[in-house]
Image (cartoon, rainbow, N blue to C red):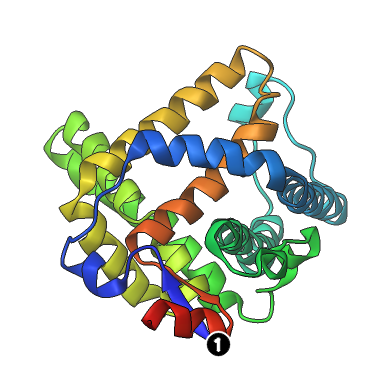
Amino acid sequence: MMKRIGGSPEKALNNDFKLDTNALLQQAWNLTKSTILPLLGALLLIWAISQAGGYLLQSFFDFQMPETPEEFESMVLPTGFVLSMLVLYFFLLLPMQAAMYKMGIRNAAAVEAEYPETYKNKPLMVFNYLSNPFRYGGVELLRGIIPVVALVIGIMIHPFVGFALAGFVAISLQLSTPLVVQDGLNPFKAIGVSFRVIAKNFVPFLVITFVMIVLVFLSALLLFIPLLWFVPMYYNLIGLVYKDVFGIEVEISDQADINTVV
């Protein structure tokens, strides 16, 4: 039998939830201690495929990346190279990135699941969504494009307005991909639901985003090595947030369900 733990879609849409940012960050940190290896393995696969794909396309189109500012200014990208990179990005890398959110949600579910071993991740799960790139890559693409559109519109008013609006929109769309991979919403509906829910309760999401940005900047002081921890932690954090906001269905035994009712 299935039981929804954490929040629920109804409560989320009615703004009937509270997020304890300190507790969520602490939970994400602790959860990462036991789940980091599969996440790192999946991230390594994404990195390796992106590097290999870029190298092969550069070789095929006989294109060399510029090494000096002068070469960069005079750089002309071959049309075929650009189109091929876009295909690689949309049909391969974006669905793989969407799968990372699903892995974070599975880790969050395992915390309260009766059978946590069934939610263990494997690095190869990063390939789970390649069969439907228009759904899983599409939502990731929309998440990237919409804040840029907001930036352009806002800058027409004032640069500060542009960056503030883009930041607000980007944060408000944070749960759109999890809504697609976990609850099966189509990309456009997921975008709308995520924006509606987060915009009404924006401050906790702003705090979480700010903390993660600070951690990235601090990582720069150590050659970005701490990102090997913070990036997996980010996906676990989003999974925990999703659980508290929308809830996650987990499998329970019939006996456990009877005991709950009694």
Work out which residue is located at the far top of the displayed protein and give it: 221
Q: The residue tagged with tag 1: helix, strand or loop? A: helix
Q: Is residue 175 above or below residue 151?
A: below
The front one of 13 and 252 is 252
Work out which residue is located at the far left of the displayed protein and give it: 157
The percent position of residue 120, horizontal first and vertical second, equals 72, 62
| Residue at 70% over, 33% down | 228
Count of marks, rendered view: 1
Q: Which residue is mark 1?
A: 254
Task: Give the amino acid type for the residue marked by disc 1 in the picture.
Answer: Asp
Q: Is residue 41 visible?
A: yes
Q: Is residue 167 visible?
A: no
**Quadrant in which the N terminus appears:** bottom right
Q: Residues within 10 Å of mark 1 (few under 14, many from 20)?
A: few
The percent position of residue 140, horizontal first and vertical second, equals 49, 62
**Quadrant in which the C terminus appears:** bottom left
Q: Is residue 70 left or right of residue 142?
A: right
